[in-house]
Image (cartoon, rainbow, N blue to C red):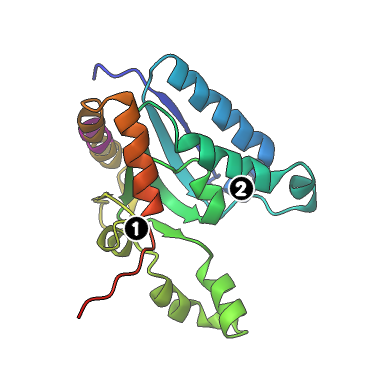
Amino acid sequence: NGHSVVALGHQKGRNTKQNISRNFGMARPEGYRKALRLMKLAERFQLPIITFIDTPGAYPGVDAEARGQAEAIACNIMEMSELKVPVVTIVTGEGGSGGALAIGVANRVLMLENAIYSVISPEGCAAILWRDRSEGPRAAEALKITAKDCLDLDVADEVVEEPIGGAHRDHARVFIAVKAAIERRLNELCLLDPQALATQRYERFRSLGKVASCE
């Protein structure tokens, strides 16, 4: 509706063959570098950026590490914090650790109602803390990974409602809801000047996880 944007994101599959061909949504360093090139182009042409997150995390293979996976993620986080255009992110499924954050440093973070956002999977957390992956539900509760939890903790700015049973039950309805949420957030952000956008985004993420005490 009047906005030209640059959109990018993760993509999984709907069956085993598609998941394998898309590496289960786990990007390699080349993918993150490609995403950064697109974001820098968007900045050059003064276009807002929309990112869609659905990944269990960045690909952890030895070959990815050899090609600079950690550097690619760190570089994206640094560069995204300084972009002078509006950035809106929506977590559509899994938001896993640095693999999500590498395209998720945004002015506004939206989440679908049944999406999750976490530094580690509940099973992985349980295996580390209690040496028992079956303690996943306990870890999930402690991690506060749900969309509602993230909204309460100011990790997310808005939760987009899904149909009963999940987004896949009514794609059209979810598309309309997501479009409306993105447009609403872009209209807010387009009122800010370029430096204010970068400052707000940087301060937003620097403030996450701060602990305060009260008497």
Locate residue 42 relative to residue 69 in the image: left or right.
left
Q: Amino acid at mark 2?
A: Met
Span shown in magenta: 179-184
Locate residue 154 relative to residue 24 in the image: left or right.
left
Observer-nearest of 207 and 181: 207
Q: Quadrant of residue 6?
A: top left
Q: Quadrant of residue 35?
A: top right
- Vertical position of residue 34 compared to residue 13: above or below: above
Image x and y of residue 153, in percent: 30, 62
- Vertical position of residue 128 compared to residue 39: above or below: below
Determine whether the residue tagged by mark 1 lies in a helix, strand or loop.
loop
Asked whether the beta carbons under mark 1 and mark 2 sit within 8 Å of each other, the answer is: no
- Residue at (42, 58) in percent of width and height: 117
- Residue at (25, 31) in percent of width and height: 189
- Residue at (43, 52) in percent of width and height: 93
Q: Comparing marks 1 and 2, which lies closer to the viewer?
A: 2
Q: Amino acid at mark 1?
A: Asn
Image x and y of residue 168, in percent: 37, 48
Q: Which residue is mark 2?
A: 26
Quarter of the figure with the C terminus: bottom left
- Vertical position of residue 151 compared to residue 54: above or below: below
Q: Sequence-wise, which precedes: disc 1 or disc 2? A: 2
Determine the residue located farthest toward the front in the rendered image.
215
CA gap between label 1 and label 2 equals 20 Å
Is residue 132 found inside the magenta-colored segment of the image? no
Q: Which residue is mark 1?
A: 114
